[in-house]
Amino acid sequence: MILMASVQNLEEALEALYGGADIVDVKNLQEALVGSAHPGIVKQVREAIPLDRHASVTLGVVPNQVGTVAMACYTAGVLNATSVKVGFMKTEYDAAVEILLACKDALDGFETKLIGSLFADNPLYDGLDASNMVPLAKDGQCDGFLIDTLTKDGRNLFDFMPESQLREIVVEGKKLAKSTALSGHLRLEDLDELARINPDIVGVRGAVCQMGDRSSGVHRDAVANFKRELNLRETGQIEVRETDTALSDDGWVVIDGTGKTCAGILAALTSQIGQDSKSFIEVIIPDVLNSYDVVLWAEEGEHSVVTQRKDQSGAMRILIRP
């Protein structure tokens, strides 16, 4: 899991960067429920953030206007944003797909990734239910997706969608090699649940602001603290579930997940099984949380997890019998 901090200006972006955020996500919290920052602010942030660090853009809740949204995505590409998030509330499914496909076309030639977004509390607004997130991301040719919330009454993501449902959505997204992100007034006390779900990206604002007040501005110390707590769970120093480990012999077909995202590991496993359903597979996984996803993938596919162990480098090695 990597940390995405929502920022509204250059000062907050730098605070997030110095605190260790992996992604600074530029948005405008004063525009409607959530909206887009001015292009000038995005340009300032992108020019100040090293290119090897991510600076993304949120369009918020977009209108049902294909050309307008595609033009906004094109602008994100021109500004060299790492990704652009296109969010839907009261949009019919087919219309949302049409908008996303136009956005994908508008980003052709740019490195900016297209992220589709639905809101867990959309039913409050008679909007498109977030259970549609995976098929929408697939049909809209998105590079990834984000599930967020819109309400500002103290409720957060888990008040609208249970851990089990979010877990299923994230795993399905990873199987399709989509990046997966969760946000929505998330707090430090939600980290165990988030770690069990294991999205690629955790998005926060209030939790990384001074005194936890989302209106007080992002602060580097709060960012660093949240990032540290994320890492404790990712490395297994804080256990979020029980696991059994055992030793295994080397050999078999080896899939090295070093440097790969969890989605990449699951995609490689799926491809290997599709080509060869008889050979044992040993998969090397760089962190503990991704190993949970591999075990779940194996269980859902009715494959046997023969052994799990940590090697001398600290990586997890899981032996799977198809």
Image: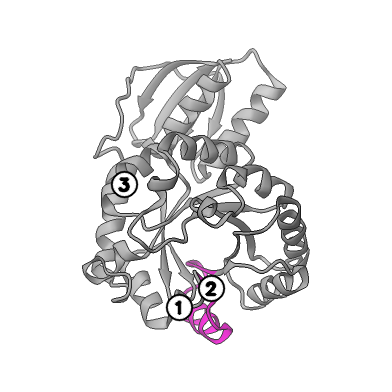
Q: Quadrant of the C terminus?
A: top right
The residue tagged 2 is 35
**Percent coordinates x, y for residue 128 in the rendering:** 62, 51
Q: Measure the C-alpha gap from mark 1 to mark 2.
A: 7 Å
For the point 31% across and 30% down, the residue is 241
Kind of element beneath mark 3: helix
Q: Measure the C-alpha gap from mark 2 to mark 3.
A: 26 Å
Mark 1 or 3, nearer chain start: 1
Kind of element beneath mark 1: loop
Of the residues shown, which amino acid type is indicated by label 1?
Gln
User: Which dot marks residue 30?
Assistant: 1
Numbered range of the magenta stretch:
34-57
Q: Residue furthest bottom?
A: 40
Q: Is residue 53 magenta?
A: yes
Mark 1 crowdedness (10 Å alpha carbons): few <14, some 14-19, many ≥20: few
Q: Who is closer to the viewer here, 208 or 290?
A: 208
Q: Are marks 1 and 2 in contact (CB under 8 Å)?
A: yes
Of the residues shown, which amino acid type is indicated by label 2?
Gly
Is 178 located above or below residue 64 in the figure? Answer: above
The residue tagged 3 is 191
Kind of element beneath mark 2: loop
Q: Is residue 56 magenta?
A: yes
Q: Who is closer to the viewer here, 8 or 161?
A: 161
Q: How many marks?
A: 3
Q: Give the label, 2 or 3, closer to the camera.
A: 2
For the point 32% across and 72% down, the residue is 218
Mark 2 crowdedness (10 Å alpha carbons): few <14, some 14-19, many ≥20: some
